[in-house]
Amino acid sequence: PSCTSCREPLNQRPPYGLCISCERALEPNTAPVPKSLMDQLDGFAAPHLYGGPLADLIGRLKFNGERSVATQLAKLIHSSCSNVLTSPLTHIVPIPLGRARLRARGFNQSTLIARQLSKRSPLALSHCLRRTRDTSPQTQLDKHTRRINVTGAFAPNRARVPEHIVLVDDVVTTGATMQSAAQTLRAHGAKTIWGIAAALTA
């Protein structure tokens, strides 16, 4: 086996697929939860800050199509956030992609991560949310425009929305996407919503 990030050979396979050097290079997220994230959420957790080996892993998943990386990201999340993935929360909901980006990429990275988290927890995977339109990539926009970009971009994908939800995304920056998704879910019956991401952009 080799390190998922630097590809150096490993004597044994560690829990996250990273060598000791890459694991030590992960920057723990010890910052307070940004206030902008808490308008619609009951809580938020991201175990690490975006950068270093973690940025490399997320980039390879999203842009190189290395789907197996989703398993490593889910393990990293679960190791720090397993206390969130319990009752009274019942369902894990991935942030959906727009149709155009889903066709181009071939998969939704948040769905892959959410599926692996569901396997490691008692929470069921739910596709109760959909994008109503394609939006511009958030990385190209400033904080104010990001919020406008995703306003009204989501709708329920089924008549009944679970009441107690964990929203999952790969990276959160301003939280505009997660807030918009949570607002839609609350408007259609969700009572408790936590947000979880593999990384938070400082």
Image (cartoon, rainbow, N blue to C red):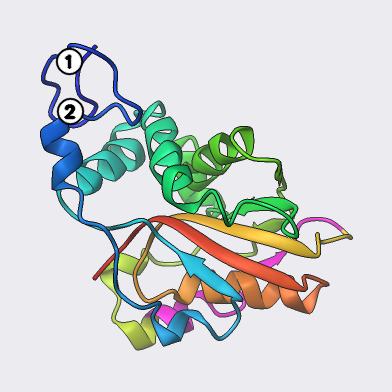
Q: Amino acid at mark 1?
A: Leu
Secondary element under disc 1, as helix, strand or loop, is loop
Q: Position of residue 186 (x, y in %)?
A: 74, 76
Residue 182 lies, with reference to residue 79, above or below; the image says below
In the rendered image, residue 155 lying in the magenta stretch gets the answer yes
- Please identify the quadrant where the C terminus is shown: bottom left
Specify start and end residues of the magenta stretch as a single range.
146-158
Q: In the picture provided, is 137 more to the left or to the right than 176?
A: left
* Residue 122 falls in image quadrant: top right
What SS does tag 2 mark?
loop
Name above or below for residue 127 compared with residue 187: above
Residue displayed at 30% across by 76% down: 141
Which residue is under mark 2? 19
Taking the image as drawn, is residue 129 in sight? yes
Q: What label does residue 94 carry, if any?
A: none
Give the image location of residue 11, x and y in percent. Answer: 18, 11
Q: Nearer the viewer, residue 187 or 137?
A: 187
- Callout 2–callout 1 Cβ contact below 8 Å: yes
Image label count = 2
Q: CA distance from mark 2 to mark 1?
A: 7 Å
Quadrant location, the N terminus:
top left
Above-or-below relation of 177 to 34: above
> Dot 2, crowdedness within 10 Å: few (<14), some or many (≥20)?
many
Q: Position of residue 53 (x, y in %)?
A: 18, 42
- Of the two numbered discs 2 and 1 on the same chain, state the one appearing first in sequence: 1
- The answer to whether residue 56 is magenta is no
Q: Residue at x 53, y 53 (%)?
A: 97
